[in-house]
Image: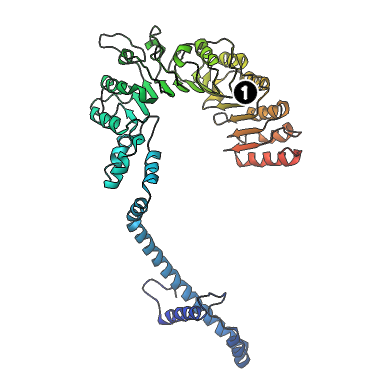
Amino acid sequence: MTITRKQMDKETIQNIRGILSRVESNGGTVEKSLSFDAQASRRMSSRGGTNALHNLSKGKLRQLKKSRDCLRLILEATNSDIYSLERDTWSSSLQFGIQSLPDDVLRGIFEAGIRRSGPTRNEDEELYPVHLSHVNRRFRSIALAAPRIWARLSNSLTMTQLEVYIERSKATGLNVFLDIVYLMDEDKGCTVEEFLTLTIQQSKRWQTFEFVCGRMEHEEGYQWGYTHPMIFGYGLHLPCLTSLTWRKECYDEEHEDSDLPIFFEDGELPELMHFDGLNVVVNAPSVGSNLISATFRFEPESDSEWDLNDTFRAFAGSTNLKNLSIGFADMKTHKFTFQPAKLENLSSFELTLGGFINDGFILNILSDLSMPRLDSIGFTFGRGFEHGVRDITAVFQGMMAMINRCGTLQKLAMDFTGYPNPHGWTMISALAQKLQPLNEVTLKALKDYESFMLPGLLKSPVPWRLLRLRECDKKVYGLICAMVAKYSDNIW
């Protein structure tokens, strides 16, 4: 008979008590057998024979099973109580635990939670420091003594909030975020004019500046391209700015004004080290000569003409430039102007291709870009790449040629996320056979398409000291491991 929550007979309860008593008398030690007495069984067998022993064992078995079922119910009820108590005490335990932390640790936690770059997801995130300062007196005291959590200034804040943030950020560097595409609701924030008027007064404190712009049109119909007219009214003298982001969203060349200068071209940005651009080009006067890293992505919504000569001349003139990342997507019919460029001190280069691509321009980039001191190179095949390139073989050969020209190359990364095609295996085999020894190779998202080809393609040791596989099919891992085991020559 199955024991339910309402049905526990006295015999079962007594048996559990007996077991617990034996554990107690044994000093709290639980033996392998809690209730079975071997000596008593032998005595019973000598007196009543095998049948008596069998009946005793069967009875004991029933009793133990009933005890087990009873203990399961007790355990289930105990777990339910534990869950309820944990749920009821979680917030108070968390609060007590946080409150017990030293002030400097709490301050570090507060600072780790603030978003310093990129758009915020909601109003609560933008008002994060305000919410912190309203938890209790101690939190308020710590928040007011943590200027860095107040250092992000966005035009989604009201003028009053901006003034409070500026005051409480004290002398720390400011992270300025101006979005005139998604944050133009003046009922929730401030106007661009109000924002710039107030924040430009703190220009010597600007540390990062992100400008997200869309197509602007003056009230009289004058086209301002993708730069708000107000931003031309201020001389951007930013002596401490280290990072600049400029994004032209939903770019359409028909609405661009090519006669307008780059809005920060005449500014003073002596400390600018990092630049991130979307659908933009730059020149040497605008970015200076101290760039360390640069990221450029081109994803326009319509056909455009792009002259990248000035941009790459600016890169060549930045003798400190170490890291360059470029991405192109859905630009098959676009016209590009690009002349051979030499990036003398570049150590890391990444190229991302997605959607419909202008094959000829990509081949020009691959053949005419010289990077004699390159240490690391990466290629990412984004979504739609498989269907967006006419001559995949030529593009792969161009990549191979670029890699082979880099005599100092030590690291190679290839991401096939957007390219589920067996040609990837052919390229891997070519890399394995023709490249000079590399210290590190990372392959991501290799698929199992025709992977049976791999053993035939790789017939000799691969000159790579470290191979990383990420997000690959299970079969791919097996094939690679088998290849490594077969062709190992003490390099792996």
* Mark 1: few/some/many CA within 10 Å (<14, 14-19, 20+): many
Q: Residue furthest front?
A: 171
| Res. 443 visible in picture | yes
Closer to us: 94 or 104? 104
Q: Left or right: 50 with respect to 74? A: right
Residue 274, horizontal then vertical, whole percent: 47, 23
**Disc 1: which residue:** 374
| Res. 136 visible in picture | no
> In the image, what residue type sits under mark 1?
Leu
| Residue at the spot 35% in from the left edge and 34% down from the top edge | 121
| Residue at the spot 32% in from the left edge and 28% down from the top edge | 154
Residue 260, horizontal then vertical, whole percent: 38, 9
| Quarter residue 187 falls in | top left
Position above or below: 2 against 237: below
Position above or below: 336 against 27: above
Closer to us: 198 or 187? 198
Q: Residue furthest top?
A: 259
